[in-house]
Amino acid sequence: MGFSLIQSIEYCLSEHPSIVGFRWSTTQSWGSTWSFLVTSISVYIAAALALHLILLIFRRRRPVPLGPFPAIHSLAMALISVLIFVGILLSAAAEIRDNRWLWRRTKTTPFQWLLCFPLGTRPSGRVFFWSYIFYISRFLHLLRTFLTILHYRKLSFFRLFNQSILLVMSFLWLEFSQSFQVLAILFTTLLYSVVYGYRFWIAIGLPSACFPFVVNCQIVLLGCNLVCHIGVLLFHLLRGGCNGIGAWVFNSVMNGAILLLFLKFYVNKYLSKRKTMPVCDGDGDGDGDVDDPSSSRHLRPTSLESNTQTFGLRRKQT
């Protein structure tokens, strides 16, 4: 029973004809044109700025009640991330199994293929199907910007920049069959499944971590990406070239910029305040935002909690 269930999952996520026969093209794939990408990003930025401006004009100080929508969004993104992670993991294993005999002729190892696609690789097949699903899921990530604006009445340049760049990079992975995208999707979806699961945990009222959980996860992800980018560069120079190297250069520059912004925020926010007493995070956003670290909040004791603690301390002293 268990073995047949595993086989069914493997078939649905890596051997289904629609997955094996996938092909990235302007006629078969939704959102596969440059005009669609540019229009989507422009509409996203304009809508976010308009919503932020409306809240400023009306000078609304209290958060807009969002009900269960933040929790639903976090749960949905966590489940989608788990699905993509399992799907591309099984698909990569199937590609390695099916092409191992061919790689022996060119002395290509599975690890090298994960980092460096051979020249002439086309955006078709299993792993590119899940790369396409990851690209589509980036549009669902954009909803978090509007939830943050409504709840915190706050919009930062970094959030718009980061979300837009991540959407462009996922598009370039498909458009140019960029190397390293399999590992990048595995790392990113693993992070998102943990981060959005944590956000769902917080959103339903469960206790949060007393350290910058989300920001630490993001720095680990960016650090792993940086190490893998070095590996891609070495394979490109020593093995005769990797496919989609132009898109990879853009990807590397943008990842480096995002990493520097996160490190700058981390040093200013946490390392420079070691002497202060750490407090637990208490907002629905966790301790920080994977898309905008500057959106972090900290839970301060309310007046009722402070009075209760003071009364308990005085009673203990007496």
Image (cartoon, grey):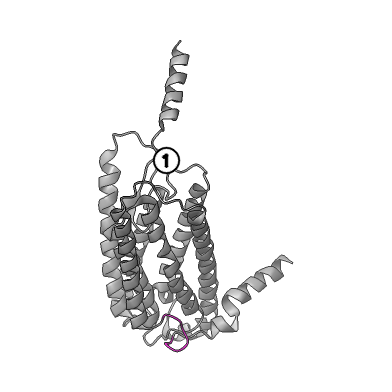
**SS under mark 1:** loop
Quadrant where the image shows the N terminus: bottom right
Q: Mark 1: few, some, or many residues within 10 Å (few <14, many ≥20)?
A: some
Q: Look at the image and say whether residue 27 sits in the magenta stretch.
A: yes
In the displayed structure image, the side of residue 237 where residue 66 appears, left or right? right
Magenta-highlighted residues:
25-31
Nearest the camera: 117 or 190?
190
Quarter assignment of residue 14: bottom right
* Residue that lies at the very extreme toward the top in this rendered image: 318
The overriding secondary structure of the stretch rendered in magenta is loop
Q: Can residue 268 be seen by looking at this rendering?
A: yes
Q: Which percent across, then down, holds residue 317?
A: 44, 13
Tally of numbered discs: 1
Q: Which percent across, then down, holds residue 146?
A: 39, 60
The residue carrying mark 1 is 210
Q: Which percent across, then down, holds residue 92?
A: 50, 74
Quarter assignment of residue 57: bottom left
Question: What residue is rendered at 46% in x and 83% in y?
Answer: 29
Q: Look at the image and say whether residue 233 sits in the magenta stretch.
A: no
Q: In the image, is residue 266 above or below residue 43?
A: above
Q: Can residue 234 be seen by looking at this rendering?
A: no
Q: In the image, is residue 104 above or below residue 59?
A: below
Q: Which percent across, then down, holds residue 52?
A: 32, 58
Nearest the camera: 148 or 266?
148
Question: What residue is rendered at 45% in x and 60% in y?
Answer: 192
Question: What residue is rendered at 44% in x and 84% in y?
Answer: 24
Q: In the image, is residue 301 above or below residue 247?
A: above
